[in-house]
Image (cartoon, helix red, strand yellow):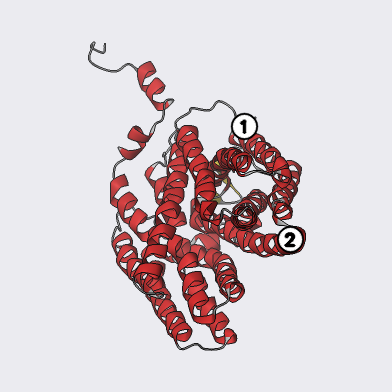
Amino acid sequence: MPTSSSPSPSSKQDTARTPGYRQLLRTPGAWAFVLPGFAARQPFAMLTISMVLLIRHTTGSYGTAGAVAAVTGVAMAVCAPRGGRLADRFGQRSVLVPGIALHAASVVALVTVALLHAPAWALFTAAVPTGATVPQIGPMVRSRWAVALDRPAGRPSPLVQTAAAFESVTDEFTFVIGPVLATALCTGVHPAAGLITEATLTLVGGSLFAAQRKTAPAPHRMAAATDPRRGSALSLPGVRALVVAFLGIGAVFGGMQVSITAFTQEAGHAGLNGVVYGTFAAGNMLAGVAYGAVTWRRSPRRRLLAAYAALTLACVPLWAVQSLPVLGGLVLLVGLCIAPALITGYTLVDALVPAATRTEAFTWLTGAVALGQAAAVTVAGLLADHAGPPAGFTVPLTGTAVALAVLAGLRRHLAAAPRGVVAAGVIGHRRAVAVD
């Protein structure tokens, strides 16, 4: 018989059903990768703005600077999933150590080309390896959370969603600090100081993160030969649906950046651009913190569809905005709707894909955001130039509306992947269960 000081089985179950950030950070080994992971992903938030400021200084053209930054984003989006797949197969350290060295060398080459006032084609050429070698620290950290929270019985931990929320807030926090630090370095020290610092932090932070071997997922070298789904995480329909969803989220980020800038400039308050966009980021962070602290009873599939519908509706009135105060309120609302969609999408990855393709799946989503953002920046910029700033706000609406339609059509694929039973000679699958 348990004593009064011993927790009963029911109380343990209640604790498991009440996940929180304090409980999450008490996970054994969590701090060993959380802190180095935060330091290692900070450079990513500095890269684009540092590149734009340096190339604008050396060429005198925002157009050239933006185009070079877009090439970097596309290169990252294309190459990141391949890097994630290699990390799944050979281990994170084996991919990360040479990757951070190549990235630092590529950044130094780009800085050199820019300072030598080389022609535009040379800048574009240097931008490709710079983007292709961006370390995918965020997906690697998410994979480590999945390992740390994994349960032998196959049941998902109630802390999986909390971990996804924690990572979303951490990502957003880096994008609050990174651009400010990069701008201060480029304007107060030297135009190349932002990129040089980015390369240095990549080497130092990436090395510290790679040194945490105990928390890294085990390599899955033999998975390709034993798992018929191992070809690519993108071969799973559910992952493809999430990629489309994250492309739409990237369209929101890119469209908002350009359109807010154009709107504040036309209104004669260009200095308020950072304040308005900061409101958008603050909404995202606040919603992420709150969303991760709630124990949800509805399935992730239903929550994703509901969150995405809310995000699409929040984007509807943006194109008709006429004043800065109204714009500030609307971008706050959009920010509040972004986090639930992001967090639920990342949460679904753990249920949809086997461990052997987990990092790759996360990098597909991260790359989709980057690709959607690059495309949205270009389209929103053209619309703002030719039809006025409000026209640029149609990009977030179009991107989310199309993605919502795809999600609704593919919703049946957003169910848990089977694990735990023997199927076709493969061990490691469980019987599919209804989640709605």
Q: Determine whether, in the image, residue 427 is placed left or right of residue 368.
A: left
SS for callout 1:
loop
Which residue is identified by label 2?
A: 383
Task: Give how far across and how far down residue 126 sits, in percent.
Answer: 51, 81
What's the residue type where badge 1 is placed?
A: Val
Task: Give how far across and how far down residue 188 sits, in percent.
Answer: 35, 68
Q: Which residue is drawn at 69% across and 41% down?
A: 312
Circle 1 crowding by C-alpha within 10 Å: few under 14, some 14–19, many from 20: few
Q: In which quarter of the image is the N terminus?
A: top left
Front in this rendered view, residue 391 or 265: 265
- Residue 418 seen anywhere in this rendered image of the structure: no
Q: Determine whether, in the image, residue 254 is placed left or right of residue 379.
A: left
Q: Residue at x 57, y 65 (%)?
A: 77
Q: Determine whether, in the image, residue 31 is placed left or right of residue 139.
A: left
- First reached walking from the N terminus: tag 2 or tag 1: 2
Task: Give how far across and how far down residue 387 sits, in percent.
Answer: 77, 59
Placement of 324 over or under 95, stated as above or below: above
- Residue 330 seen anywhere in this rendered image of the structure: yes
Front in this rendered view, residue 352 or 182: 182
Numbered circle sitting on residue 258: none
What's the residue type where badge 2 is placed?
A: Leu
Front in this rendered view, residue 46 or 202: 46
Kindly report which numbered mark, 2 or 1, lies closer to the viewer in this rendering.
2
Q: In which quarter of the image is the C terminus?
A: top right
| Figure quadrant of residue 407 | top right
Q: Residue at x 41, y 39 (%)?
A: 152
Circle 2 crowding by C-alpha within 10 Å: few under 14, some 14–19, many from 20: some
| Figure quadrant of residue 196 | bottom left
For the residues marked 2 and 1, what is the alpha-carbon distance in whole angstroms? Answer: 42 Å
Which residue is identified by label 1?
A: 435
Task: Give how far across and how far down residue 403 sits, in percent.
Answer: 71, 48
